[in-house]
Image (cartoon, rainbow, N blue to C red):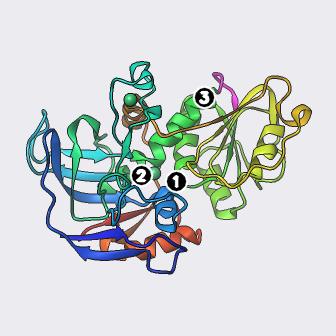
């Protein structure tokens, strides 16, 4: 099969990804063999390719938003079923975090496309216990970005602790933000989008945001909660200053540039909270996909052939992708 590997992590444009021919992988015990129908390109793939996230093993196939068809039956899944493989691939089930429902914090957790080969390929294997059944109302390319952008955005929204009918600020408006904003709007929130891209601001308004402005200007009203999707640490004080008393800022990214010095009175006093978001639990994934089945989310995707994975990553690095980039094997 054709696949891509992160061969030599480094700045984009230096051939960090290489296209290879590999044998079709063999499923181990409890694993499914999947024929890949679509795999979305996540910003985390870029961090892996550029070396911001150190490789866990050499020459790993990236891609953790994989839509596939089950080829060999296992663990209650039948051949021909369409399933999704996401970032969280395995947890220990016995540590203090796993036992209290916080498997996203498991120190032994493993990740698709980092600890094991992912979906930039024609086939992949995945543990059946961590695979999702998918809402039927979306095409393969549309449902792929729901598997990381969607699930992580959903967890970030939950971590932001937005009160019912509250005012939510969304900083940055890429694949994850545009999905989380729709969930918040479906749940009755007022959403203010703050982003530098004029195209993204237009999309935000079309999707039902109450306002859309530049990231460094204050929103039109104080916020009960905010989510920082842009990997830009200098926006942390900006977003904290926009919070109303008791508001929470959730930082959604796995990687963030340095946060400037905070001022206690200006940024944190009046019980404002700052918290990070780390991966997700399977419960988050199932809840979000159930929401996506009840509510038709608008998913904006740009398709690339699998052979153009390097171009898709370069386009993502240069902010040239509208919505989510999705690789489709031919
Ligand atoms: Zn991701
Ligand atoms: Zn654990």
User: In the depicted view, which residue is nearer to us: 186 or 301?
Assistant: 301
In the figure, residue 242 lies in which quadrant?
top right
Q: Which mark, residue 145? A: 2
Whether pointer 1 and pointer 2 mark residues with C-beta atoms closer than 8 Å, the reply is: yes
Which callout, 3 or 2, points to the residue nearer the camera?
Answer: 2
Q: Residue furthest top?
A: 100
Eyeballing the image, is 315 above or below 257? below
Residue 298 x/y as whole percent: 47, 49
User: In the depicted view, which residue is nearer to us: 201 or 157?
Assistant: 157
Residue 251 x/y as whole percent: 64, 42
At 33% from the left edge and 66% from the top edge, which residue is drawn?
Answer: 59
Q: Which mark, residue 175? A: 1
Q: Is residue 32 left or right of residue 274?
A: left
- Is residue 215 shown in magenta? no
Q: Which residue is mark 3?
A: 188
Q: Earlier in the sequence, mark 3 or mark 2?
A: 2
Which callout, 3 or 1, points to the residue nearer the camera?
Answer: 1
At 55% from the left edge and 74% from the top edge, which residue is drawn?
Answer: 11
Eyeballing the image, is 329 above or below 184? below
């Amino acid at each position: 099969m054709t696949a891509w590997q992160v061969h030599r992590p480094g700045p984009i444009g230096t051939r960090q990804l290489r296209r290879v021919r590999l044998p079709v992988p063999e499923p181990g015990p409890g694993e499914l063999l999947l024929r890949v129908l679509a795999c979305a390109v996540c910003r985390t793939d870029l961090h892996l390719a550029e070396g911001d996230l150190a490789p866990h093993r050499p020459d790993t196939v990236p891609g953790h938003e994989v839509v596939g068809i089950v080829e060999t039956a296992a663990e209650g899944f039948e051949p021909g079923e369409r399933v999704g493989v996401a970032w969280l691939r395995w947890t220990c089930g016995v540590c203090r975090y796993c036992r209290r429902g916080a498997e996203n914090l498991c120190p032994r957790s493993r990740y698709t496309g980092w600890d094991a080969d992912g979906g930039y390929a024609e086939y992949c294997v995945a543990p059946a216990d961590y695979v999702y059944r998918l809402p039927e109302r979306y095409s393969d390319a549309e449902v792929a970005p729901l598997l990381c952008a969607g699930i992580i955005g959903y967890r970030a929204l939950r971590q932001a602790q937005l009160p019912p009918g509250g005012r939510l600020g969304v900083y940055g408006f890429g694949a994850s933000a545009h999905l989380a904003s729709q969930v918040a709007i479906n749940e009755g929130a007022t959403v203010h989008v703050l982003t530098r891209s004029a195209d993204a601001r237009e999309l935000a308004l079309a999707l039902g945001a109450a306002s859309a402005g530049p990231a460094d200007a204050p929103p039109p009203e104080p916020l009960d909660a905010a989510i920082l999707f842009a990997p830009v640490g200098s926006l942390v004080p900006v977003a904290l200053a926009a919070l109303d008393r008791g508001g929470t800022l959730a930082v959604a990214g796995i990687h963030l540039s340095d946060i400037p010095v905070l001022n206690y009175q200006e940024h944190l006093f009046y019980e404002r909270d700052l918290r990070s978001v780390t991966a997700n639990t399977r419960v988050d994934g199932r809840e979000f996909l159930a929401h996506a089945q009840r509510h038709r989310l608008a998913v904006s995707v740009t398709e690339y052939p699998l052979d153009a994975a390097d171009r898709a990553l370069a386009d993502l690095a240069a902010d040239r992708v509208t919505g989510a980039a999705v690789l489709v094997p031919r």
